[in-house]
């Protein structure tokens, strides 16, 4: 299992401008996440969880400080560069799955591969591997409306892992699911972390979901107020 | 909605331009480069022209007039009458009844009697353009065509003339027409074909300058080119309407695409998060708009195809007679349709696509 630094945040602040007001969201935040960690971010609404996730995923820039992911200082990348960086390094799992309704499960999973140089045959192989990994290879021709919520989220996970990204970010991945489906999704994330060594950052409100993570961070008013190692990873230097 | 709107606009515009194209085609093919039309000096049209029949007979003696394969002189005295005739729908319109000579048919390109036979002089017979026959009462084969209160002719044949101006006319023997209108001593014009280019120049000079004649000799191609006021009128208003319709359709396309951007904001955010760039999103939305409009354009063109079998009547502002024109879906109309479709697709889709491109990924992902 790899044991290098996956993510390093140094004195990161994030502020939003609302008319003439400046609204601070994250304040001088430091964080280190090691490769292969499964990290849960918790905190009340407005605490800055999703903002932190967006900064780590390269969807937004920090107002100050450094966000270094997989050795890359994201603040130094232009918008075009960070877009390509996301395509190569990050898999996204959203609360509402965010599948394209007019595309089949196969086509949805294939989407990120359209940005690569893979030929059609290789793309098909990769998509089917990803769908098998989430247990939905039989549903490749189904449209999102023909799938249950849990199945939709599994397709979304297949889309997130199809490019074999360095980092998986999940924003409330079980927030729209019933308990049974949520359990399946969490087991799948746990499996991706343990078997494929994926670094996962998950924002959640659900304490049961958070228990699956190795490490639990609590945010409040833009500051880290808790950092608990729940289940130490094998070989991890805590 | 965009497809249907675009289809309707393209269909309307193609119909208008198809009419104009038909009219222009009729005028374009009516003139042979070696044909001359002899008119009274100062007369712009055959209907306002007129001179002595004796002078016309003297013209036939000039050298340089072509003959057909049987040695018959390609020279025709012609007289026109513009009676009021009842249309099939009960309304009335002026049409051209042309008193012709034996060579008249040979001076019209692709003139063919397609049903019945040619008229026989002094029997009150006529032949009628096939397209005109459908539009006027009594103009069908075997019918009695009543022209005003006094004239009537039995229709013994239907002809086509390759879509030329002759397809808006009724033809009778020139002596019959002169007798019916008490104008046996005059003609409206003479049509002739020169044996060659040099002969044409000589004939034109003689006819215009020789003191025996002092008439206007115009090349038929020039004569018909000047008769474009009808098509200019139609073209102007057709173009104006087409421009307004295109703008309307552009707004419809833009509206559809704005709506698509609005309802797919989260999809756009997702695509951007997955690594698709702004240019990918622009191409995606612009492409969709163009495809939708192309489908509409193709549908619109298909809808106008059946019109090619139709003919319509329009007022000729030079003769104030009804001109029968066949709808033509020629290259011009096709180009207009493609240009309109492209304008609707590109301009209608551009601004919504730009809006999609400018969306911030994070705010787009928050959309429900």
Image: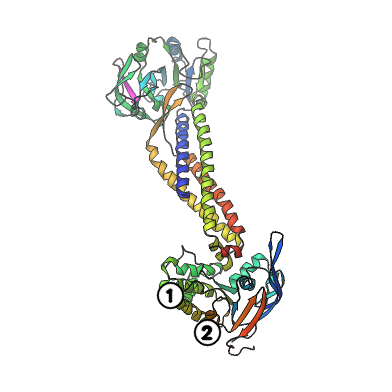
Asked if residue B237 is positioned above or below residue A1 in the image, the reply reads above
**Residue B83 point in image, percent of width and height:** 38, 18
Of A34 and B145, the residue lying toward us:
A34
The mark found on residue A92 in the picture is none
Q: Which residues are magenta?
A: B121-128
**Residue B72 point in image, percent of width and height:** 38, 21
Q: Badge 2: few (under 14), some or many (20 or more) residues near its Cα, within 10 Å?
A: few
Residue sitting at x 60%, y 90%: A235
Q: Badge 1: few (under 14), some or many (20 or more) residues near its Cα, within 10 Å?
A: some
Asked if residue A184 is positioned above or below residue B309 in the image, the reply reads below
- Residue B96: say if magenta: no
Q: Which residue is mark 2?
A: A195
Q: CA distance from mark 1 to mark 2?
A: 19 Å
Colour pattern of the rendering: rainbow
Of A108 and B18, the residue lying toward us:
A108
- Return the disc, 1 or 2, that comes first in the chain's sequence: 1
């Amino acid at each position: 299992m790899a044991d290098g630094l996956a993510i390093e945040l140094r004195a990161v602040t994030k502020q939003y401008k609302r008319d003439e007001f400046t609204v601070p969201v994250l304040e001088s935040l430091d964080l280190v996440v090691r490769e292969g960690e499964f990290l849960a971010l918790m905190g009340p609404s407005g605490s800055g969880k999703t903002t932190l996730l967006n900064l780590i995923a390269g969807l937004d820039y920090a107002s100050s400080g450094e966000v270094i992911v997989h050795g890359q200082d994201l603040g130094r990348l232009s918008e075009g560069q960070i877009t390509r960086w996301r395509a190569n390094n990050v898999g996204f799992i959203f609360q509402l799955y965010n599948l394209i309704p007019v595309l089949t499960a196969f086509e949805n999973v294939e989407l990120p591969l359209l940005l690569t140089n893979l030929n059609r045959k290789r793309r098909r192989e990769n998509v089917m591997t990803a769908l098998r990994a989430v247990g939905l290879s039989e549903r490749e021709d189904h449209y999102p409306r023909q799938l249950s919520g849990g199945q939709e989220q599994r397709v979304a996970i297949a889309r997130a892992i199809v490019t074999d990204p360095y980092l998986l970010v999940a924003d409330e991945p079980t927030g729209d699911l019933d308990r049974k489906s949520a359990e399946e999704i969490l087991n799948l994330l746990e499996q991706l972390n343990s078997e494929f060594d994926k670094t996962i950052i998950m924002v959640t409100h659900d304490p049961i979901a958070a228990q699956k993570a190795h490490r639990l961070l609590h945010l409040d008013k833009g500051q880290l107020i808790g950092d608990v190692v729940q289940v130490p990873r094998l070989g991890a230097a805590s | 909605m965009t497809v249907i709107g675009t289809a309707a606009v393209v269909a309307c515009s193609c119909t208008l331009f198809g009419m104009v194209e038909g009219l222009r085609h009729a005028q374009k093919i009516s003139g042979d480069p070696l044909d001359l039309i002899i008119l009274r000096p100062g007369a712009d049209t055959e209907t306002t022209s007129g001179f002595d029949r004796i002078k016309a007979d003297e013209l036939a003696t000039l050298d340089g007039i072509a003959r057909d394969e049987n040695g018959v002189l390609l020279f025709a005295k012609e007289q026109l009458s513009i009676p009021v005739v009842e249309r099939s729908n009960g309304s009335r319109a002026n049409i051209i009844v042309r008193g012709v000579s034996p060579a008249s048919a040979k001076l019209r390109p692709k003139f063919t009697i397609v049903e019945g036979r040619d008229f026989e002089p002094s029997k009150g017979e006529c032949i009628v353009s096939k397209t005109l026959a459908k539009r006027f009462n009594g103009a069908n084969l075997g019918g009695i065509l009543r022209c005003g209160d006094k004239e009537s002719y039995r229709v013994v044949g239907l002809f086509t003339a390759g879509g030329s101006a002759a397809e808006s006319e009724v033809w009778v023997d020139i002596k019959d027409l002169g007798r019916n209108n008490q104008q046996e001593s005059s003609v409206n014009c003479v049509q002739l074909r020169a044996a060659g280019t040099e002969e044409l120049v000589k004939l034109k000079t003689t006819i215009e300058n020789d003191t025996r004649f002092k008439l206007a000799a115009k090349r038929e191609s020039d004569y018909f080119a000047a008769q474009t006021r009808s098509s200019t009128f139609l073209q102007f208003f057709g173009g104006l309407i087409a421009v307004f319709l295109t703008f309307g359709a552009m707004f419809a396309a833009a509206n559809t695409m704005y709506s698509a951007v609005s309802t797919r904001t989260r999809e756009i955010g997702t695509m951007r998060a997955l690594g698709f760039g702004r240019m990918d999103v622009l191409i995606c939305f612009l492409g969709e708009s163009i495809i939708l409009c192309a489908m509409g354009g193709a549908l619109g063109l298909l809808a106008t195809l059946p019109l090619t079998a139709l003919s319509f009547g329009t007022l000729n502002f030079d003769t104030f007679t009804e001109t029968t024109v066949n709808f033509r879906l020629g290259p011009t109309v096709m180009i207009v349709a493609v240009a309109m479709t492209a304008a609707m697709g590109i301009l209608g889709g551009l601004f919504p696509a730009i809006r999609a491109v400018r969306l911030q990924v994070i705010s787009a992902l928050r959309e429900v």
